[in-house]
Image (cartoon, grey):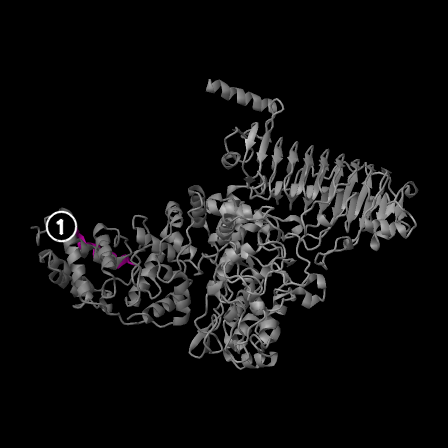
Amino acid sequence: MRRGLPLNNSRALSKMMLPFALLTLVACSGDVGPSADSEQAASQAQQLLATGAAGDGKQLYAACAACHGAKAEGNKALAAPSLRNQQDWYLRRQLQAYRSGVRGSHEKDAYGMQMQAIAKTLPDDAAVDAVVAYISGLGKKAAEATLTGNAKRGADYYSNLCGACHGPAAEGNDILQAPALAGVDDWYLQRQYEHFQQGIRGASEDDKYGYQMAMMANTLPSTEVLKDVLVYTQSLAR
Amino acid sequence: MVRAMHWLVIALSLVAGMHSAWAADIPVKEGESIQAAVNRAAPGDVVLIHPGEYRESVYVDKDNITLRGVVVDGEWPVLEGEGKRNDAILYSGNNFTVEWLTIKHFKGNAIMGQAGNNYTIRYNRVIDTGVYGIFPQFGKNGLIEYNVLSGIEDAAIYVGMCDNVVVRHNEVFDNVAGIEIENTRHAIVENNYAHNNTAGLLVFITPGLPIKTTYDVILRNNFVVNNNTENFGAPGSIVAKVPKGIGVVIMAADEVVVEGNIISGNQTAGIVITDLAFVTDIASDPDSEPNPDRIEILDNLMFDNGADPVADVKAAMMTQFKRRGPDILANFGSAQEPDNCILNKEQYVTFGLKKWSKCERTSTADIETYLLADGAPPREIENDEDRTLRLYQGICAGCHAYNMRMIGPPTVAIQALYHNNAKGIADYIAEPHKVRPDYPPMPGQGHLSEEIRQKVAEFMLNVKK
Amino acid sequence: MEKRYSARALRRLAVALCLLWLPLPATVHAAGAEFSLKDYCPAGFQLNGEGCYLQSLYASYDSLQDSGVGGLKTGLPELRQGFSPRQIDLGRLLFFDPVLSGDHSMSCASCHDPNKGFSDGRALSVGSKGQLAKRSAPSLWNVGFLKRLFWDARASSLEEQMLGPLYDSHEMANTPEQLLTDLRASSAYRELFAQAFNGDSSIQLDQVYTAIAAFESSLISLNSRYDLYAHGYHEALNEAEIEGMNIFRSFVARCAECHTPPLFSHQQIAVIGTPEPNNRPLDPGVAAVTGDASQRGGFKVPSLRNIALTAPYMHSGRFATLREAAEFYTGGRGHAVPPGEKLSLHWHIWEPKLTGEELDRLVDFMGALTDESFMPQIPASVPSGLAPVVGVQ
């Protein structure tokens, strides 16, 4: 019924504000920040979503494909992670977190803000479910490993600290709502861990699961060890 | 009316002088259960047992509990074992008091303590209970006074493996052993009347027990009279081997003082001092030092002992061409050594005391008591904070290390998962369910009260690096 | 309180820092498997300086004459402790490694199987060549508290004890020379011994014994439901178990007189006259060691912790169930002593005339002494490259 039309004021507002917001972000982000390509892709995505069909996951995903790739395989150049090895409930939760502003609201989370703006153009919960279902339907595919480090040392740290929630094979834990790490882009996970550590992500107690991870994000002693752990979790990917 | 009664009770309590402002009296009437009252009781409470017959065994595993009989018009509360119940009263708590009870016909003991410190056992009548009448074990600082015990096939009062005990003003008769002090230190046995037992007072070491010594025992101002009852001890028991007709037996114990007693009419001997060889048929224990050392016999009134000694003693006396038995017999071996001493030896008929020396002191009057002025220190964890800490360390920390995987997930992960949610932990540990495929299931802690679970959970959330 | 808490917190910090900042021990490769020794203490222990020390609620209590025996709230006997985490972990690997036996067929865990209460479920243990040992394998739970070892109490330390099974031709049938040769031939073991013993990779016999003793001493079982009752949580035991506990400590059954809390053994010798199986001749027990006839048929009183897991019972495994073992004590003083034997039976062996229900309650209570919450990890592989051996093969 509402499909394609920016009936919702807040959505319209956010759409208008987006280019300005992105500019600000690039200036002050803790990250390198979205490239011009990324920005272009993002605004394309919004256009597409604004005119897309809410019930049709494939059609909706077309918007996402601009950054995350046609097969959701991710695009490191655009800093968009692969979505293929993430659980559907986790993708859903994150999309909803972006939509509600729980995620992607911190001024230093440039990519998060970008993603928040896009997620907010998804018309309703049904659209979220549809696009997630479409991504799940693409099947599992592990992202390529890009980091180097000491996998054995990473395994020790992983087993001692991370495995309690993320599972013995970094496959995630549904009961604890802990996402899979194996097969998720290691460079993306590194950035997220650092965001948790720096209070960019999960700083608010309203973000229950994010806050949990933020509490854990001071337990690894160094970036070196973080990379070791990610090398290890990536080695578990199937 | 109820209210008036309530005030009356409070007024009476105040008059009676309660130990604690919070202590309550819990009355038990005939037909009710003493154990149920003990289960309801909190530390400091007094269970008041009214006259009548109670057919039950009672155990007390709490501190600061008093069981007090109420005697009305000469009617006592009676614990009746009917020859089939095990022990009448079994306690492990500290600061336990039991008084004003009549206890009859149990298979085991009338009053038995295991590791309770600061016990008081007084004003009880114990009749024909199976093995021991009063038997505190592994306790420090105890008072046993004004009890009357008879018809017991082992020891009427048996202080076993204790420290700092006073046994006084008791009457023990028609038992195999009157009062025994065994593998115990710092004990005073005074002003008791031990008569018509197989043996009156016994101070000794039993080999094969985990606490190996008996020393620093004073036997003073007791009547030890006519202990000539036929030994009816159970076959195999140690006292079953004690010859009848002995006033005082000192076996393998050290530093025992015998002073101011009236010891008369004991037909085998007034006092026997011996090493462990006295008891045969028992597995030897190399860790038990077998010799009686530094025994002191000060002035005692002794007469008419040894009139009809058992065969062994008679044979020993025959070697000295004497027909009647001795007031004091030091058995062959180390009991005859000069580290033992006696005053006015010439007053008595003695055997084996030739080498004994003369005691330097004449009295123990300077030793008033061996009870500890401030009691034995409490064994209980004193406050909730300590208890919570030990519980966490002793139980939780076994599986949850701060930031490493042991048996359960690291504490830091639990702190993240349950941030600001101690109740979540408290609920989970009551009935844990499996959350992680590669961790063993957690044992449930539902037996801990909700309050304790909550405290431990809060503690866990605050464990810092 | 605040101060104590901070001290504890500081120690925890030390543990954490060790884990996080010290270089992790070098990984050792052997036969395709990787080994590194844990640098943290086993469950229930806390690192204090170099060594691991037990944390227990029982530390809150004392015992008369520091005897470690008494009643509910009573301190424990002294524990062998203070071994380093790596020594304990090396001991764990050795414990499961069949390289310790002469023909590489048996490990310590053959007869001390963690899945069977660290016993073997057999009446008499079986040696590497199928020979029957003379006596039943005792549980190793809480063995670090024991001052005397073996049924006949002939060893006074774990190190002394393990010489028995290692070199007895009826058991692991090894020799000290071969043991050293085999261990030294393993580069993995050389590296692990160096980690556990200040860089010394030479491998000495006393190091082998220390490591195994360290592991054995870490086998702690003090968190049973009984223990919760003892600490004051009376709801932990049900009515039948409390009834059983009262029979257990009564002066009729007298169980607690020798199986004294908190360890449920007073660690003394007792002659109780249990029957031997299949008309085997009477085992002289302690008397064969000491030559003292009064100790004929005498054995060390075993702990009853985890007893429900370690059937069959007695030195000869004569009783298949706890019920049968309990029933022995009410069968009459000396009823199973062979004719012509005169034993100095313990004075607590008498005729308590326990009823069938009382025996059932005793069994209920002994079941409440079960606790395996600090079960160590059974290694998937061992440094020798041989397959780890657990239980009777």
Residue drawn 43% across the image and 71% down it: C380
Quadrant assignment, res C158: bottom right
* Residue C57 x/y as whole percent: 54, 50
Q: Position of residue A71 (x, y in %)?
A: 17, 68
Region in magenta: A14-29
Give the farthest residue toward the left.
Answer: A1
Residue C118 visible to an observer of this rendering = yes
Residue B184 part of the magenta-drawn span:
no
Label 1 CA crowd tier, 10 Å (few <14, some 14–19, many 20+)? some
Q: In this view, does B431 lie to the left or right of C243?
A: left
Above or below, comparing residue B389 to residue A89 in the picture: above
Q: Residue at the location (55% across, 40% down)?
A: B59
Dividing the picture into quarters, in which one does residue B67 lie?
top right
Query: Would you name the residue on which mark 1 appears?
Result: A12
State whether residue C101 is above or below residue A225: below
Q: What residue type is labelled 1?
A: Ala
Chain of the residue where label 1 is placed in the rendered structure: A
Q: Does the magenta stretch include residue A27?
A: yes
Which of A14 and B118 lies nearest the eye of the viewer?
Answer: B118
